[in-house]
Amino acid sequence: MSLRVLTVLPPRELYAEGHAGAISLLVSRVALCDDRIIGRAVSGVPLPGGKFVPLKRGIWPLPQRLNYALSCVHAARHFRPDLIEVHNRPDLAMALSRVAPVRLLLHNDPRSMRGAKTAKERSRLAAKVLVCAVSQWVATCFAEGSDTSPRVEIQPNCVDLSVLPAERPRKKQVLFAGRVVADKGVDAFVSAWASLRHQYPDWTVVIMGADRFGPDSPETPFLTRLRPQAAQADVLMTGYRSHPDVLEAMTEAAVVVVPSRWPEPFGMTALEAMACGAAVIVSPFGALPDVVGDAALLAAPDASGALEAALGQLMDNPALRAELGLKGRERAALFSLEAARARLVALRQAAIAFSRGSVAP
């Protein structure tokens, strides 16, 4: 018997082709055909996973976040699900736990999230809903300061290997793909390339992305400062590109860099780049080292000469690039869609058992 599952997106996520962020893309990827997904109304074509139903806008004279929460409660009571899955909103998960069993999936460090900022709040949350995290790093953040070691299950992100572009000859190209913000270390990458470019005249460098997801991403002070630096270093900045375009670029680039200063809670870009067979360089922060294992080079973006050394090591050594490309594909296969869906089904059953005070399978 299939479960009636209601998936609740964060209010800023858009479940639409060409506008989807990382959470929406992952929800679409793993969703089962009968899952109902709710979130902000979108223009254009919704993502294909599950059945998307836009929330009706609340008419209550309340702050926007409370209107969103009340709209979710109303939708849940109308749908009457067996399980509610809430992404990245601890406060909303707690509110919806009064309606049905809830599974909370954390994609980021919860210590800055409303309803999970303190150890006491997190312990109270873990007593009411089944908490899941995309990495052990996120789970460790959740448990910080607790005397009781709250239960946190791991549900890693995944990649659909069946939709990746066909393998093709690699260009002598280094690619950054993702949000072009300081946290992602893009400026450190540009600076590193500026000091190397004259040694590698037959290589090109591309930055693919913008401040936000979607073609209407705004210009920001960071981008305004970065553009002349990139132009002087002969770095091409393409702006926002769709997810299929990013995967195509990863399949062609010899090297993909993920030089994040911010401790990545998972590192989806690194996983996709490995799946596409590129040689990958990542920073040693957050969950990135756990995701890549021994299939990538590590380089801290602000450590003097570290990023330059890693780039030079790969550009000088085609055999090493090929070795890391092969290891990366093998590593990415551990995060397959099939494994993710099996884990999803098991955790859904565990969440329902948890809400009943039973021992989960």
Image (cartoon, helix red, strand yellow):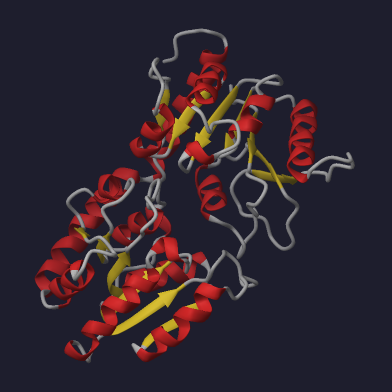
Residue 77: x %, y % from top left: 78, 26
What residue is at 31 percent from the left and 67 percent from the top?
257
| Residue 198 or residue 21, whichever sits in front | 198
Instruction: Give the quadrant of residue 317.
Output: bottom left
What residue is at 47 percent from the left and 66 percent from the top?
181
Instruction: Give the quadrant of residue 283.
Output: bottom left
Left or right of 231 on screen, residue 331: left
In the rendered view of the protein, which quadrant contains the C terminus?
top left
Instruction: Give the quadrant of residue 104.
Output: top right
Residue 286: x %, y % from top left: 33, 47
Residue 30: x %, y % from top left: 50, 43
Answer whether residue 252 is visible to the viewer in this image: no
| Residue 183 or residue 67, whichever sits in front | 183
Left or right of 20 on screen, residue 79: right
Residue 27: x %, y % from top left: 54, 45
What residue is at 40 percent from the left and 15 percent from the top?
148
